[in-house]
Structure formats: C-alpha cells, structure tokens
Amino acid sequence: MSTKIGGRRGRARVSVTALVLGAALTGAAGAATAQTPSPEDDAVASVDEVVVSARRRDERLQDVPVAVTALSEQTLQNLQAGDLGDIESAVPNLTLHVGDASNAVVYIRGVGQIDSLAFADPGVGVYVDDVYLGRAQGAFLDVYDVARIEVLRGPQGTLYGRNTIGGAVKFVSQPMTDEFEGRGEVTVGDYGRRDAKASVNVPLVPGKLVAKAALAMAKRDGYAENTVDGSDDGDKDLLAGRLAFEYRATDDLTFRLNFDASQDTPDTSRTPARATPVFGVPASTDPFKVEADFNDRNDLKTSGVSLVADWRVSDVLSLKSVTAYRRMDYDTKLDLDATAFGFFGVYDDEAQNQVSQEFQATYTGDRLTAVGGLYYFREHDLTYSGLYGPDIALVTGSLNDQTNTSYAVYGQGSYALTDALSLTAGLRYTWESKDFARTQKFFDASTPFPVDYGSPGLLVTDIDTSHDWSSLSPKLGVDYKVSDDVLAYVSVSRGFKSGGFDGRSNDADGARPYEPETMWAYEAGVKSVLFDHRLIANLAVFQNDYTDLQLSSFVADSGGGFAALFTNAGKATIRGAELELTARPVEPLTLNAVIGYLDARYDEYIGPGGLDISDQRTPVNAPKWSVRLGGTYRVELGEGSLVLGADVSRRSKTYSTVSSSEILAEDGYTLVDAFARYEAPGDRWFLSLGGKNLTDERYITHGFDLSDSLGYQLAYYGAPRTWSATLGVRF
C-alpha cells in the first residue's frame, strides 16, 4: 500500500513540475511574440481585467505579486452564487462549506479550522469592507449588494494579521454614487425557494451626502425529510439588510457610516445521516431521509456598525481609519444520535461581541509604495453548551466565558529598484491575550431540555486562567516585469495564529494553554496577459511548512463516556500548484479553467496516547486535485442578448475529519451547473434560468467521527440537484 501511494505522489510531482515549466515557457514565448493590440483587435476579443485591493490599495489584479482570485459581480452571477459556499469551485485549492453549527468552514491550501466553538479561532479571515469577522458563525455570508469577492491565498500576516494563517476572504460592497439608482431581483426555485434582493442609492445632498439601503430575503424548505414526523429538515429563513451613508466633507476627506443586521431563523436545521449503525439502528440508506426525535435548530442573529474615514492628505499620502462594532447571537440544538429514539442531543447558546479599530497610512511615491498601520481588536464570547439524553444518568451543562484582546503594528513597502524589478518587505508585530473561565455542572436527568444553567446542579469544573502570546510575521518578496503583460514573483512569509484554551476540557488540562500555530510559506508565481489580451494565465507554486497544528478529536474517557480534546498535533508540509486561465478566443465566447493541486502530509502527529501517528492521518480538507472548467457564450438578440453558460467541477478524495475516517472521506465527486440568461437592452432587466448539481451527485461535505468514543459516525451531505429562475431589474 505504501509503495503505491508513494508512486502516485512521485508521478504527481513530475506532472506539476511539467505544468510549471510549460506555463512559464508559454508566458515567456507569449511575451516575446505578442504585439500591442490595436483598438480594432481589442474590440474583437479581449479579456476583462479586474482591480483588487489585496495589498490595501487599489491595483490591477495582474500587477499584484500575490496569489489572489477576484470574483466580479458578473462572475458571481454566472456562478449562481447565493451564499459564500457557491464560490468554492471558482478558486483553486479552496474548500468552503457551512458546518454543523452554521459556521463557515474555510480552508485555503489545506489550512483552516474545522472546529466551530468559540475557543477555536478560524484559520482564514473573513472581511466585509475591511472589517474582520471574529467568529466562524456569522461568516457564511449571503451574496447581496456585492461588487466583488477577493480570495487571498497563503498567509496574510503582514497586512491583515489576525487569524489569516491560511489566507483571507474579502467582501467588497457595491460603491455609492451621485446618481439615483437601484436594482432588484426575485428568485424562485424548487424546495420552495423564494429569494428577493433590492438596493437603492439616493443622493441626499448632491456632491456631499449619499445614502444607500440594501435588503435580502432568502427562504427555502429543507432538502431532507425527517421521517419521524414528516417535516422538512434543513430549512433556510434569512433576512438581512444594510444601510450606509457617505459624506464627502471635501474633495479629499470622506466618511462612510455602515449599519447591517441579519437573522437566519429556520424552523429546522440539518440533521446528519447515519454513516454507520448507531446503537443498533442501521446506517442511513438515503442521506436525505433522516431521523430525529426533535427538529434541530440553528438560530443566528448578527448586527454591526462601522465608520470608515478616508483622508487624501496629498498626492502621495493617504490616511484611513476603520472603526467597527459587531454582535452575534447564536442558538443551536442538535440531535447527535440521528435516530428516532432520543439517545442524546447537544445544544449551544452563544453571545459574542467585538470592537476593532485600525489606523492606516498609505504612501505612493515614484519608486516606493508603502502601507503601515496600527490595529486593535477585542471580543467577548459567552457560550453555554450541554449534553442531554434520557439514557444519560447526569445531564451536563457548561459555561465558557472568554475575552480575547489583540494589538498589532505593521508595515509593508515595495521599492522599484528598476522599472522592471521591485523588492517588497513587510513586518507585523502582534500581541494577543486570552482570559478564559469555564464552569460545568451535572444536572438530574429529569431536568427539562434545553437545560437552564441556573438550575440546581453539582459544580464539577471551575477553571479561571489567562495567557498571552506575541509574534513577528515578516514577508519578503521580489517581482520582475518580464514585459508590460507578464509579471514573475517569489516570496516568503510567516503566518501566525495565537494559542488558547480547550473549551471542552473538564479537568486541569483545560487550564493549560495550547500553543500558537505558525507557518512559513514559500511561493513563486507568474501572471500573464497573452495573445493580444485574449488570454489571462496565472500560475503559482508553493510550499507551506506548518507547525503546532491546532486540532480536535473525540476519544473515550475513563468514565465510559467520551471527551473532546483540542490540542497541538504536530507538523505538516503542504506543497501545491494553482493555475487560473481565462480566455476569449472570439468575442461571444469566454472560457475559464481553475486547477488546484495539493500534496499535504503530516510530518508529525502526536495522538491522545502520546504516540506519533502521522502515518495514519491525512490533513483535513486538502483534496489532491480540484478542477473547474467552464464557459459562457453570448448571442445577440436584437438589441438584447442571450448568455449561455455551463461549468463542470471535480474534486478528488477529501478527508473531512481529523481522524482521517475512511467512512466519512469523500472519494471524489463531479458537479455540473448551467444557466441561460436574457439581458434586455441597456441592462434594464434580465431573466435567467439555472440549475446546480444537474447530475444529482451525492457527496459528503463533513461529519462527526464518534467511533472512538460512542462507536458510530455521522455524515453531512451537499445539496442535491436544484433549479431556479431569477428576474432582475435596474433603474
């Protein structure tokens, strides 16, 4: 077996090396032979280029020596993107789905965090208009009033800092204008889907004050049926809104005030399927026919306010301030045996709030461009969770009270040594502290569910502790413009995620902190615009040396029950390559390809027994191959046009649990999506019809491996085949 695996890895490395050399030679040859396109040629067929703010200033995507994917509003529409999860296939080496607790599970290049509880920080940062979302709950955002989504791959410790060891996902809202304008969309589909989105931009004082309001509503019945009572399982019931004001005090000074709120309060949330028998109940034969003695619930409410001030001090210097406050309330109840017999369930009630402040200065000179700033973040999280079941002698309930504080100072600059050669250097110093208190009670089994923590009980755990960590996150890079249309770069950077405390521990181990994660990342890439602007080809190769991975697992305890451990597991090496292609061979036709390759392995994995079990484990959410091929074709119909699009995506075998369970591993799957859209003259309105997962593929996204503690495993599946129709208007 080991010989076979090693042979496969060897062949994969040869293939990736050939791919890298081939793409580099193609880029060089294209640069040598390409001519500046004439206006006539450009009108015939050229690929649209995108502006991004990956380095905290607006730049052309092809000029940024960073592995970043920018998904424009048009691209998101073609992806039929309703929420964050719909962008997964459009970004190489991205794994993204909603977890069991309505949390965003985001992995980039095999780096992220699968645990949903508040003590476990995410490994990929999610931002909305420069405001960091501290918790994974509330980060699985719906797509509305979005100009673009940027996905930065690799550690972003210098410019973004906190919990971006794997990368960052940035939502950029639609800009405000001096025109009265608006848009709206209504979508209907199967499973009772009915969505609505609307926004309006209103100049209140011409040239001075603008207001904008946006609203989104999304409702859908569950994909699954609870066969116990016949109810739908996994509904969606979202209402979200945003109100913004932009005040232009002078031509150089602007203030933007944003308010947002959302609530997702479905009647039921998803119940997992039985991947193995549960206490004698056979495994599920249909993942969308589930059993639960009570309907699961995931109620999530978020709100926030932010104030952004931009001051253009001079032609070369700009100052920016981002002040934000956010709140999140989350309540979940989960039938963790997935049977009709009510063996036991779990529940969580979480309240989190955060305050952040960032001051930033940007300098743009003839040869030197630089960004520097100060950052402050503080959050308080109170989580009440427990375990309940009629066959459990003592019902448990615990209360975690945690305060996290972070300070950082950072700077990064790029200096043009020549017109073609530039050097980039950056450094961030981060100091973080965590104050953690945990109490746990045992209650009588007759206590009503969910248990009120104020009910009489036996106090069995009382932990009150704190710790702080600090780190330097450097970055060094060199980029070279082979021509106006070809950029080559190399970089080395360090990522950092602070340590913490095991929020499930009920003994003295809970008072001992686990250590920070760190990662050194090495990357080389080529960005090119070739063949008279008909092809954009971006290639990146990388290696991540990953230390002190923070992982959780379920194990049996001495009392015959089970315990969840969260600790530093060891070391891993992740190598890979990414290729993104966008081509427009003729004006009506646009083709695109996204290819990601990962070779992820543990170098050391210390299991609960203190033994190195690295040969028995594979890093989670790190498929060897992720590929997407797609295209659109535009047909002119009178003054309007018809756009036809389709794409196929393929992911190879993916382990969804830290235990590397083969039962919960997805062996690989292929998804096919397609759409047809009529666009009226002047983009005044459009009508589209689309379908996703047209072959009705059944595939596992994640699961619970409780085999070492309770003897069974539970699986969550991706959405089945769906269709939808959307009518949109603009005015």
Image: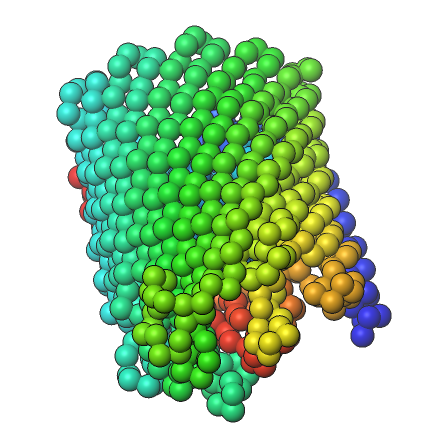
Q: Quadrant of residue 334?
A: bottom left
Count the labels in the image.
0
Q: Nearer the viewer, residue 26 or 3?
A: 3
Q: Position of residue 702 (x, y in %)?
A: 52, 67
Q: Residue furthest right?
A: 3
Along the line of sight, the residue nearer the viewer: 573 or 69: 573
- The answer to whether residue 589 is above or below residue 335 is above
Tell me the residue at 40%/82% (across/down).
Answer: 390
Q: Which residue extends farthest left?
A: 204
Q: How is the image coloured?
A: rainbow
Q: Residue at x 49, y 28 (%)?
A: 375
Please tell me which residue lies in front, 574 or 494: 494
Q: Say if 182 sits above or below 321 in the image.
A: below
Compared to 68, does 607 lie above or below?
below
| Quadrant of image for the N terminus | bottom right
Camera-side residue: 301 or 512?
512
Relative vertical location of residue 257 with respect to residue 583 in this rendering, above or below: above
Q: Position of residue 500 (x, y in %)?
A: 58, 47
Which image quadrant: the C terminus? top left
Q: Please tell me which residue is depicted at 41% across the width and 10% down the height of the picture.
A: 313
Relative side of 46 to 141, left or right: right
Image point (43%, 17%), residue name: 319
Q: Is residue 730 left or right of residue 175?
A: left
Question: At which x and y percent is residue 608?
Answer: 70, 65
- Does the image show residue 285? yes
Q: Is residue 628 something that shows in the picture?
A: no
